[in-house]
Image (cartoon, rainbow, N blue to C red):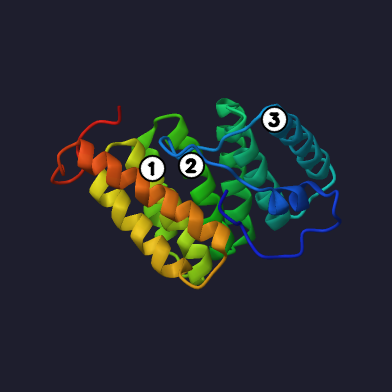
Amino acid sequence: MAPIDDQDRGTDDDPERLIATYRWRFDPDTLREVLDEADTALFHRIRAGLTARLATTPDDALRARLFGYRAGIGRSLMLLDEALADGQRALVHAEAAGNARLIAGVQVGLAHVHQWRREFDAADRLFAAALAAEVPDPVRSFYHQHAGKCAYDQGRYIEAREHFERAMELRRDGDPELLASTELALDAVRRRIADSGGARNGSAPVR
């Protein structure tokens, strides 16, 4: 899940803290999150915690962040209609707050929901808007990683590889866990390119 901002996340049992400390696992072929039964139970707990926070939070910037996180958790749980509604609410609140970095972060989260719904035109527009924003390199690396996954889902493997390579450049001296996730994505897209015979623009459909 892409970071929405870098503010303090509160106490250790806070839902945002649980998200920030969660160790993500990804399928090496689909590049999607892998949740077991314990993960699923935790995500439902996190989602309930975010809902409780939203009930008492009037601030637009904080509501944007909370709705954004709830959209991401809902997407991982395959609650795609709820995730879409939350992502759209997050964007409304981010725009009301007038914070360009926050807007870009929730655009990426909403784009990811559209991607999983296979609404690729909407996803591509939101990823392009987010990548045009002025954000720090560590944050931009997440944007490229997720935009690459969207291109990958569409069979645009050359474009996906370019996004993953850019994410790798931006993460080169960073968190080993983030580097490992990008290496996983690069390995996957290289296999797809090889399997499709080096498609000119990675245009072979996802199988």
**How far apart, in angstroms, are the residues tagged by discs 2 and 1?**
7 Å
**How far apart, in angstroms, are the residues tagged by discs 1 and 3?**
23 Å
Judge the density around disc 2: few (<14), some (14-19), many (≥20) Cα neighbours within 10 Å.
many
In the picture shown, does residue 50 fall above or below 119?
below
Q: State yes or no: discs 1 and 3 in contact (Cβ < 8 Å).
A: no
Q: Residue type at mark 2: give it.
A: His
Judge the density around disc 3: few (<14), some (14-19), many (≥20) Cα neighbours within 10 Å.
some
Q: State yes or no: discs 2 and 1 in contact (Cβ < 8 Å).
A: yes
- Residue 60: x percent and y percent? 70, 54
For image coordinates 37% across by 56% down, the residue present is: 164
Q: Nearer the viewer, mark 1 or mark 3?
A: 3
Q: Decide which of 190, 100 is in the foreground and name it.
A: 190
**How far apart, in angstroms, are the residues tagged by discs 3 and 2?**
19 Å
Which numbered tag is attached to residue 40? 3
Which numbered tag is attached to residue 150? 1
The answer to whether residue 196 is left or right of residue 160 is left
In terms of sequence position, does the residue under pointer 3 or pointer 2 come before the other? 3
